[in-house]
């Protein structure tokens, strides 16, 4: 799966997702930190299968957009409690591995 992480998630998730066999990167690694949400969604996120964010406003606004059937990216708001990276990342990965992403729609809270 091609995964994009928003700037509000720990960078240490990228290598963990890669170790799990996914093509993962982040807004920070793409040097797009601070880019407006609409621009991110229209110009960047479409190249990915899943875009994870902690930004409830971004997830909600994408859900309300008129999306074409060719828009494959799922924007999911990570609802796991934010913690230090050494606690958050293993929790994220454990939950990620057990998730069935076919049941989620853009704008949903995950997990």
Image (cartoon, grey):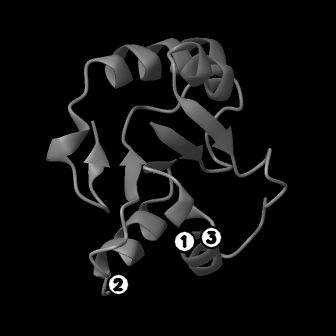
Q: Which residue is mark 3?
A: 40
Residue at point 29%, 49% (across, down): 109
**In terms of image quadrants, where is residue 61?**
bottom left
N-term mark: 2 or 3: 3
Inter-mark Cα distance, 2 to 3: 14 Å
The percent position of residue 6, horizontal first and vertical second, equals: 61, 50
Q: Which residue is mark 1?
A: 41
Q: Is residue 97 left or right of residue 89?
A: left
Vertical relation: 10 (above or below) 36 = above
Q: Find numbered disc 1 in the image and state the secondary structure of the residue it sits on.
A: helix
N-term mark: 1 or 2: 1
Q: Is residue 18 left or right of residue 46?
A: right
Q: Are marks 3 and 1 in contact (CB under 8 Å)?
A: yes
Inter-mark Cα distance, 3 to 1: 4 Å
Q: Which residue is mark 2?
A: 65
Give the class, few, some or many, for how many residues have Cα within 10 Å of label 2's Cα (few <14, many ≥20). few
Inter-mark Cα distance, 1 to 2: 11 Å
Q: Quadrant of the C terminus?
A: top left
Q: Quadrant of the N terminus?
A: top left
């Amino acid at each position: 799966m091609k995964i994009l992480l928003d700037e509000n998630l720990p960078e240490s998730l990228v290598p963990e997702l890669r170790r799990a066999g996914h093509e993962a990167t982040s807004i920070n690694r793409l040097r797009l930190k601070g880019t407006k949400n609409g621009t991110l969604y229209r110009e960047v996120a479409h190249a990915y299968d899943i875009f994870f964010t902690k930004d409830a406003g971004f997830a909600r606004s994408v859900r309300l957009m008129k999306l074409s059937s060719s828009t494959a990216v799922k924007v999911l708001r990570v609802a796991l409690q934010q913690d230090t990276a050494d606690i958050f990342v293993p929790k994220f990965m454990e939950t990620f591995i057990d998730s069935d992403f076919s049941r989620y729609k853009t704008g949903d809270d995950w997990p």
